[in-house]
Image (cartoon, helix red, strand yellow):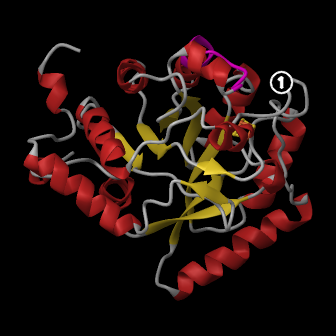
Amino acid sequence: MTKSDENRLFYSLNDYLRDKYGCKVRKISVDAGFTCPNRDGMKGEGGCAYCNVDSFAISSENSITCQVTERAEKLRAQGVNSFILYFQSYSNTYADMETIRRRMDLALVDKGIVSVYIGTRPDVIDAEKLQYYSKLNEKYEIMLEYGLQSANDNTLKIINRGHTAAEFADAVRLTHEYGIKTCAHIIFGLPGDTREDMMRSVELCVELGMHSIKFHHLHVVKNTPLADWYYKGTVDLLTQQEYIEILAEGIGRMKPDMVVARLVGDAAGNTLIAPMWPQNKAEFTQELMKYMTENGIYQGCRLDHPL
Ligand code: SF4
């Protein structure tokens, strides 16, 4: 955060992009046809307990360039000329180097692209891939987004993540050795996680020197093991107010210069079962800011005290 932003409650991704690029930057999400090692048996089967199998439709390589050019055209019509290329779906480093390189080349087709964010799992990254991304990092800002979800290995087992917190930490450290920034995905409200565990997830990211965190609330979508647990009554979901309180505490534990890249999760289409909040993301943000203000919480406040 800059001096003039001292009154800001948290450092959002939009704030960061404005500080770094001085203009509007928007994401172009690409489904580049990668799959998931936690479904095909390489790391596990059945996938994470909250992940919707029905949404597991993979696009073909032929469409990658079209996805980028069509979205870039729409954004330009709205006055946006700088873009983040976002490899969002599934595990975007889960392939051989030749495939990764080819799909990246098919996507890097617009001169407005300034940055590339790559969503993946911590168990499908290695030195060869990082070497390649570090070369790209000379021209574009590269961000590797790793799913942690929880720093509690017992919780990771319950939700069938197929990796441990230590594997996550190793992947992040290795990525930093190549000078590449990292973002963590954390879910609050997972079965097995206490509030202390949730704070530990945030603290692990702080200790590792990560660039940003995307926060999600646990939601139940159709055709998942989590949906079965929910209908059997074996999983409790947070209320919006409970989530706001946990999220505020988590943000308070982040260093002031880390980026809060997301506040709350999204469910695709009509797949959502529960909870039905937030109805509106802008209102949710207002509620969070109101709670933080009323309780004297701001990003980094907890760092005034020993963790
Ligand atoms: S959430 Fe990601 S890692 Fe887990 S099963 Fe779904 S695609 Fe795979």
> In the rendering, at what x and y percent does residue 299 appear?
21, 39
Q: Position of residue 232 (x, y in %)?
A: 67, 38
Can you give x and y, in whole percent of width and height, for residue 68 in the image?
71, 69
Q: Is residue 123 left or right of residue 155?
A: right
Q: Position of residue 286 (x, y in %)?
A: 25, 62
Residue drawn at x 38%, y 27% is: 202
Of the residues shown, which amino acid type is indicated by label 1?
Answer: Gly
Where 279 falls versus 173 (above or below)?
A: below
* Res. 147 in view: yes
* Closest to the observer, 98 or 122: 122
* Residue 184 visible in this rendered orientation of the protein: no
- Say if 41 sits above or below 212 in the image: above
Q: Quadrant of residue 62?
A: bottom right
Q: Can residue 164 be found in the magenta stretch?
A: yes
Q: Quadrant of ligand 1?
A: top right
**Magenta stretch: residue 10 in it?**
no
Mark 1, secondary structure of its residue: loop
The quarter of the image holding the N terminus is top left
> Which stretch appears magenta?
160-169
